[in-house]
């Protein structure tokens, strides 16, 4: 594949009519190295953030050996790329067919559940088809419901066992596995490390009530990336506080600590070049949108960084909104996105930080959605890992927004 220095070179060289996804392998490698070096436990990649095979291979090469998969398609995908990876099936509601294929065909032993129903399903499906003997190698995680109050995107209402039901579920689950964990998810883009303190406090209460031996704690994803007006405290602060609270839990002396970042590992991997097809006042009609990589920009008003890729724009920055290419009014991204005031139809824009929940969200709705994929060598538009961010002396480890 041809490698370009940066987005501007691509725009000038190929003047693309369709959006172009620009991948930065070095950025993904750096994020993975940061997590595997500094997180005080095991790092799983949450595949849903971006299932691109080349990214999965890059993360594996950078030392990420465990993968959080949520569907049988993700199990097959990662197994096809990485025969030796440890796959952990973290969706608390799975079909029997998915559990069966994962366990018997792809060697998946680690499963999450949040109900007795799901526990019974897993145990039954994984028992020996001939003898009916229960599986002896299951590693089961019980998902606890925790608050999402410190996160930009909630994951608090759909999954997770309530604290009151947890002791019973832990007891029952313990009877079916030699290795029992507790997991949770504090919500995506957790802007304060305190999110994890709160969740680990809940975990502590649950373990104390249940008095069962716990072999692992999985603090889930939620580790933030950086976007305009969303600059989180350093990830080291998250790691330090998680380690401190993990150490204080009443769990097995050799208990493991896991995390499952999706966003923080993938966000810096990709950006995208879009073309302005038309301008109407402060609204730009571009060729990707709500049904493409800009899903979050449309649906939760996420503000991604933008830059014009033209040399002849002179006006100061003004605030723009985007319309995507489909015929749907909802294909609208309010921004505001700051771009030169004289930007016009035919100009190209780079939109950054689309490696997580960006490139992965593209659909073919209305016939749009094609995009070329290229590799570039420059730095992502924003980064948590390029050494540019230094902690202010006054920053408090648990400072709240
Ligand atoms: C989505 C998800 C993740 C990744 O979350 P991020 O906020 O992207 O880090 C991790 N674990 C589970 C169970 C998830 O559903």
Image (tube, helix red, strand yellow):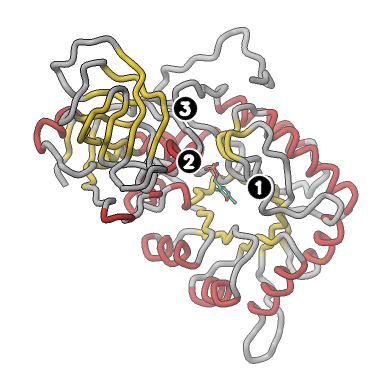
Q: Is residue 58 visible in the rendered structure shown here?
A: no
**Residue appearing at x 66%, y 31% in the figure:** 150
**Badge 2 density bin: few <14, some 14–19, many ≥20, Cα 10 Å:** some
Read off the residue under disc 2.
Answer: 299
Q: Position of residue 332 (x, y in %)?
A: 39, 37
| Residue at 62% in and 29% down | 238
N-term-proximal mark, 2 vs 3? 3
Label whose residue precedes the other's in the sequence (1 or 3): 1
Query: Quick check: marks 2 and 1 in contact, CB under 8 Å?
Result: no
| Nearer to us in this view, 113 or 25 | 113
Q: Is residue 3 above or below residue 103?
A: above
Crowd class of label 3 (few under 14; some 14 to 19; many from 20; radius 10 Å): many
| Mark pair 2, 3: CA separation | 19 Å
Q: Residues within 10 Å of mark 1 (few under 14, many from 20)?
A: many
Residue 317 visible in the displayed image = yes
Local secondary structure at mark 1: strand
How far apart, in angstroms, are the residues tagged by discs 1 and 3? 23 Å
Q: Which residue is more in the foreground, 381 or 386?
A: 381
Tag in front: 2 or 3? 2
In the image, is residue 228 above or below residue 218?
A: above
Badge number at residue 218: 1
Q: Nearer the viewer, mark 1 or mark 3?
A: 3
């Amino acid at each position: 594949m041809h490698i370009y220095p940066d987005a501007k070179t691509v725009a000038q060289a190929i003047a693309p009519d369709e959006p172009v996804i620009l991948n930065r392998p070095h950025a993904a490698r750096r994020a993975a190295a940061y997590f595997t070096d500094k997180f005080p436990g095991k790092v799983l990649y949450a595949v849903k953030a971006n299932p691109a095979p080349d990214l999965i291979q890059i993360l594996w090469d950078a030392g990420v050996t465990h993968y959080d998969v949520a569907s049988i398609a993700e199990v097959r995908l990662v197994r096809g790329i990485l025969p030796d990876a440890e796959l952990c099936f973290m969706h608390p509601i799975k079909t029997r067919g998915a559990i069966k294929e994962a366990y018997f065909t792809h060697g998946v032993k680690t499963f999450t559940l949040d109900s007795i129903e799901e526990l019974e399903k897993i145990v039954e499906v994984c028992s020996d088809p001939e003898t009916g003997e229960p599986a002896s190698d299951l590693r089961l995680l019980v998902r606890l419901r925790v608050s999402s109050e410190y996160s930009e995107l909630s994951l608090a209402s759909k999954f997770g066992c309530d604290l009151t039901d947890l002791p019973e579920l832990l007891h029952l689950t313990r009877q079916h596995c030699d290795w029992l964990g507790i997991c949770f998810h504090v919500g995506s883009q957790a802007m304060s490390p305190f999110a994890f303190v709160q969740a680990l406090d809940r975990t502590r209460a649950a373990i104390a009530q249940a008095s069962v031996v716990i072999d692992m704690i999985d603090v889930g994803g939620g580790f933030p990336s950086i976007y305009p007006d969303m600059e989180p405290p350093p990830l080291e602060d998250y790691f330090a506080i998680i380690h401190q609270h993990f150490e204080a839990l009443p769990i097995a002396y050799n208990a493991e600590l896991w995390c499952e970042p999706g966003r923080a590992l993938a966000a810096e991997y990709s950006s995208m070049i879009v073309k302005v097809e038309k301008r109407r006042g402060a609204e730009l009609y571009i060729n990707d949108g709500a049904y493409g990589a800009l899903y979050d920009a449309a649906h939760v008003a996420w503000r991604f960084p933008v830059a014009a890729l033209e040399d002849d724009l002179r006006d100061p920055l003004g605030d723009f909104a985007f319309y995507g290419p489909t015929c749907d009014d909802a294909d609208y991204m309010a921004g505001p996105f700051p771009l030169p005031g004289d930007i016009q139809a035919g100009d190209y824009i780079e939109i950054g930080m689309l490696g997580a929940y960006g490139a992965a969200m593209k659909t073919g709705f209305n016939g749009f959605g094609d995009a070329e994929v290229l590799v570039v060598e420059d730095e992502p538009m924003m980064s948590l890992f390029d050494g540019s961010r230094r902690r202010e002396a006054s920053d408090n480890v648990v400072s709240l927004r």
